């Protein structure tokens, strides 16, 4: 099962996904897709890890999330934007290759038993990117979000900390 949790920056996406994972009654798993760019970002990651606490199994994987031992678990994948950035840079800013790589990973996860809560950002609701690569990435993010939303069982839009269910497939 896939739940896509989307929204703007600081809308409560990660907190909501983590709360849902904890409410499942299963030991929760957290997959961080971020590449550590600098010490400030590393400190932010350490803070998030300590907030989650010892009940979580934590993995860090920048690209091939589907290769982790996730089958049968409730898993928070945080986040598509950073994961997609890793594919975008890996493929030298080629939108088609980056999107295909992410779609292949999502398709592989979809084949696994478990509940995958996938966190993403709605970049298209913000300011227009100033650079050509920024505009390319905004397009890429939008297409990736559309793909995941289309196959997801549930899609939740977070607005100011409030979850708004915009898609719910009967299971």
Image (cartoon, rainbow, N blue to C red):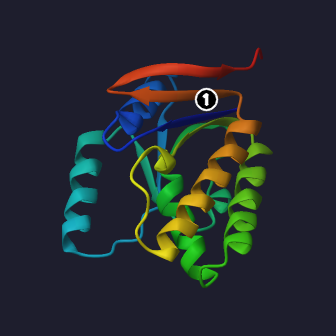
The quarter in which the N terminus is drawn is: top right
Q: Can residue 53 be seen in this view?
A: no
Between 117 and 154, the one lying in front of the other is 154
Q: Where is residue 141 in the image (x, y as percent from the top left)?
A: 58, 56
Q: In this view, does 108 lie to the left or right of 117?
A: right
Q: Going 63% across and 53% down the picture, which residue do you hit?
A: 69
The quarter in which the C terminus is drawn is: top right
**116 w.r.t. 58: above or below:** above
**170 w.r.t. 103: above or below:** above
Tell me if mark 1 has few (under 14), some (14-19) or many (20+) residues whose alpha carbon lies within 10 angstroms of its own.
many
Outermost residue on the bottom side: it is: 92
Q: Going 44% across and 74% down the picture, which residue do you hit?
A: 131
Q: Is residue 32 visible?
A: yes
Q: Position of residue 120 (x, y in %)?
A: 51, 46
Q: Where is residue 57 in the image (x, y as percent from the top left)?
A: 44, 47
Q: Name the residue under label 1.
A: 155
Q: Going 53% across and 60% down the picture, which residue do you hit?
A: 138
Q: Is residue 102 left or right of residue 159?
A: right
**9 w.r.t. 20: above or below:** below
Q: Where is residue 9 in the image (x, y as percent from the top left)?
A: 35, 44
Between 138 and 82, the one lying in front of the other is 138
Indicate the secondary structure of the residue bearing disc 1. Answer: strand
């Amino acid at each position: 099962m896939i739940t896509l949790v989307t929204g703007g920056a600081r809308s409560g996406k990660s907190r909501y996904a983590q709360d849902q994972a904890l409410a499942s009654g299963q030991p929760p798993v957290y997959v961080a897709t971020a590449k550590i760019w600098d010490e400030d970002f590393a400190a932010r990651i350490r803070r998030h890890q300590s907030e989650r606490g010892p009940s979580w199994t934590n993995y860090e994987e920048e690209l091939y999330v589907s290769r982790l031992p996730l089958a049968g678990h409730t898993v928070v994948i945080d986040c598509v934007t950073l994961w997609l950035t890793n594919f975008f840079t890996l493929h030298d800013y080629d939108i088609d290759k980056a999107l295909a790589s992410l779609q292949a990973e999502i398709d592989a996860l979809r084949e696994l038993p478990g509940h995958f809560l996938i966190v993403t950002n709605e970049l298209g609701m913000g300011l227009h990117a100033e650079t050509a690569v920024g505009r390319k990435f905004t397009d890429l993010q939008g297409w990736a979000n559309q793909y995941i939303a289309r196959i997801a069982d549930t899609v939740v839009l977070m607005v100011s900390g409030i979850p708004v269910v915009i898609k719910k497939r009967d299971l």
